[in-house]
Amino acid sequence: MQDIFETQIVYLKGVGPKKAEVLKKELNVVTFEDLLYCFPFRYIDKSRIYKVSEVTTDSTWFQLKGRISNLTPVGDKRVRYITAKFTDDTGSIGLVWFRGLTWIKKAFSHDKEYILFGKPSVFKNRFNFVHPELEEFVPGTAEVAGQRLEGVYSSNETLKNHGLGSRGISKLMRRLLIRTAENIRETLPAELVKRYKLLDRKSALLNIHFPESPSLIEKATRRLKFEELLFLQLQILRQKIELQEKIPGLIFTKVGNYLNDFYANHLPFQLTNAQKRVIKEIRADLKSGKQMNRLLQGDVGSGKTLVALMSMLIALDNGYQCCLMAPTEILANQHFNSISALLGKTDIRLALLTGSTKQSRRKIIHAGLEEGSLQILIGTHALIEDTVRFHKLGFVVIDEQHRFGVAQRAKLWKKNKVPPHVLVMTATPIPRTLAMTLYGNLDVSVIDEMPPGRKPVKTVHYFESKRLRLIGFMREQIRQGRQIYVVYPLIS
């Protein structure tokens, strides 16, 4: 039996083929469930009806109850706009329409009361409402404005032209919930709902669209966010487990001369306990028989590059090549210079490949990679070009990985018959919960300790008027052998 929420949206009363096509194109709404999960992006409080005399510019929106009179077309040969008066027992205020003029002329009767909702503007020192929302006041009905919080749905000109502005979508949503509310089932275990004091799913969906109170909006939002993030995390974890089961990993059992020589004779300073811990975590991955996908997080200056280099040396000890990809040429050059300095007294062969690398140099690099004599390649997006072929790529490092797409990372996987181990690095502080969500397919290591003797970074702020003082300060710091970087906003 088909789930009612899989029903095509064309079969909802008030939709039809044309509106269904517009909903699909503009909102990606195809089924009842798709529409159900189109949530309001804000809410309007229609719980109070103001008097005309209370209208000011202090509040964004007002709701009034009164009568419409003096509908007046303005224009010589062609009507350019229509004005009217909206009156209650405290006074009158102007109304203006610039669109839908033919309909406006016939829409309102002077002997009926209407509910007006809109944002006032000021013209010639008088308040007026331009294109206000208006509906006939019918005492005693549940649909009367002034008795509810109303959701505002995303729309655009195309949707509005098909009667699918915010209010049009709201009407469809009400029809949808009348038809399907009894079929809304709980998706979370009762124990989980109880433990985290969550609203049940049915109440959450009803109150996200037609809230009974502001507090229920908060509870409904919390419940639906919890559900979305939980299912996203479960899906990521499932994908991670499936990849680990389906994709074999290169097994690096050996720690040999490259790492031992570097550690004993070329290490510039003693490793911190955090660096030692992370290297042990990476070492365990490399000999597990499963492909490593690990995120290394640490502040600038915490020693991430050194950890990455020592991990690459393990790959070299096991007969494999390595590469490090950075998002910019400047960063790629920095990595090449720092790693070259660290390996300067060893016989390890490394090269730099960026968009600026000359063709003659590229040919030498490509040849060295394919024959295996070039052991470490550092560069930018140039590394993922099809012309870059490795003899045996076993270890990949991606710096500031959020600057690269998933497809770009996948291209490096395909540089070897068995996908290489992957270490991605970032200096961006990521809260644990966000890391679990964004990088749920990665194991996470954190370097939370700075090397001994590192001085804290000093941040100095200067206004534009103090530019000369700033330049003098920078010159003095450079004279003392210190480094500086400047953050300058493009948009103030």
Image (cartoon, helix red, strand yellow):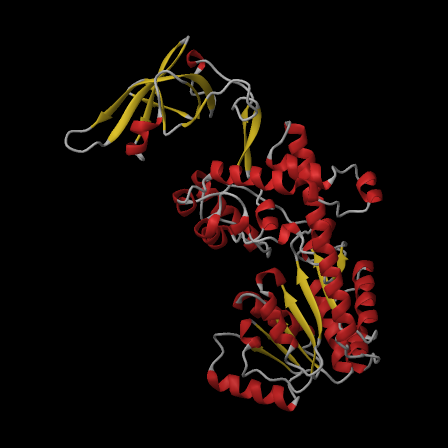
Q: Position of residue 202 (x, y in %)?
A: 70, 39
Q: Judge whether residue 266 can be spotted in this image.
A: no
Residue 246 found in image quarter: bottom right
Q: 484 and 89: which one is in front?
A: 89
Q: Which residue extends farthest bottom?
A: 371
Residue drawn at x 41%, y 45% is: 162
Please name the residue shown 58% across and 70% down the image.
408
The residue positioned farthest toward the front in the image shown: 1
Image quadrant occupied by the N terminus = bottom right
Q: Would residue 301 appear left or right of 20 to someone viewing this image? A: right
| Residue 423 in the image, given as x and y percentages of width and height | 70, 68
Q: Quadrant of residue 233?
A: bottom right
* Furthest residue toward top: 89
Q: Residue at x 74, y 65 (%)?
A: 240
Rendering coords of residue 71 (x, y %): 28, 21
Q: Is residue 28 above or below residue 322?
A: above
| Residue 88 placement, left or right of 349 | left
Image quadrant occupied by the C terminus: top left
Can residue 6 be seen?
yes
Residue 307: x and y in percent read: 74, 67
Q: Nearer the viewer, residue 70 or 225?
A: 70
Q: Is residue 317 above or below residue 124?
A: below
User: In this view of the protein, which residue sits in the foreground, 173 or 166?
Assistant: 173
Q: Relative to 404, is 363 above or below? A: below
Q: How many numbered marks, from 0 up? A: 0
Image vertical order of residue 11 relative to residue 375, above or below = above
Query: Which of the 4 image quadrants contains residue 377?
Result: bottom right
